[in-house]
């Protein structure tokens, strides 16, 4: 019986150590991650706009790279919009929850 207690106390101690070593996953971490993702999408959009401007003026050096840049920006924007829609739906669902 004492072996079980020792194992339980050791497991509990290990879990507490692991919890302390994990980074804090509070609201600030989520907000920072979200801000970083939005900035990345914004950078891709700027690259895409530059590629489109280069295409329009005939200054494009590599048509394939320009098309890839535009495609990346489009895909990342679609993904960001889907994430936003899911977050809004979750927020609305929480608001409808009765306590």
Image: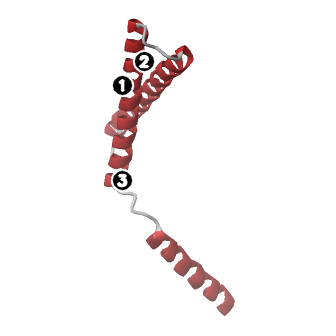
Q: Which mark is residue 51?
A: 2
99, above or below 2, in the image: above
Bin the neighbour count of mark 1 within 10 Å (Cα to Cα): few under 14, some 14-19, many 20 and up.
some
Q: Nearer the viewer, mark 3 or mark 1?
A: 1
Give the percent coordinates (x, y) of residue 48.
Answer: 41, 21
Q: Which residue is mark 3?
A: 29
* Pick the front one: 5 or 83: 83
Instruction: For mark 1, give the secondary structure.
Output: helix
> Exactly how many numbered labels are in the figure?
3
Q: Does residue 93 show up? A: no
Q: Earlier in the sequence, mark 1 or mark 2?
A: 1
Q: Residue at x 38, y 19 (%)?
A: 50
Left or right side of 11 for 61? left
Q: Nearer the viewer, mark 1 or mark 2?
A: 2
Q: CA distance from mark 3 to mark 2?
A: 33 Å
Give the percent coordinates (x, y) of residue 37.
Answer: 40, 39
* Pick the front one: 14 or 32: 32
Mark 3 touches mark 1? (CB < 8 Å): no
Q: Which mark is residue 46?
A: 1
Left or right side of 75 for 93? left
Q: Nearer the viewer, mark 3 or mark 2?
A: 2
Q: CA distance from mark 1 to mark 2?
A: 9 Å
92, above or below 7, in the image: above
Give the percent coordinates (x, y) of residue 60.
Answer: 46, 14
Q: Earlier in the sequence, mark 3 or mark 1?
A: 3
Q: CA distance from mark 3 to mark 1?
A: 26 Å
**Based on the displayed image, in which of its 4 quarters is residue 51 positioned?**
top left
Left or right side of 70 for 14? right
Give the percent coordinates (x, y) of residue 33.
Answer: 38, 46
Bin the neighbour count of mark 3 within 10 Å (Cα to Cα): few under 14, some 14-19, many 20 and up.
few
Mark 1 touches mark 2? (CB < 8 Å): no
């Amino acid at each position: 019986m004492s072996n079980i207690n020792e194992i339980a106390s050791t497991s509990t101690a290990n879990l507490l150590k692991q919890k302390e070593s994990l980074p804090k996953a509070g609201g600030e971490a989520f907000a920072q991650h979200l801000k970083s993702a939005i900035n990345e999408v914004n950078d891709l959009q700027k690259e895409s706009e530059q590629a489109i401007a280069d295409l329009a003026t005939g200054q494009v050096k590599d048509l394939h790279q320009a098309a890839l840049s535009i495609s990346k920006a489009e895909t990342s924007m679609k993904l960001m919009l889907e994430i936003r829609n899911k977050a809004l739906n979750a927020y609305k669902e929480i608001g409808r929850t009765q306590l």
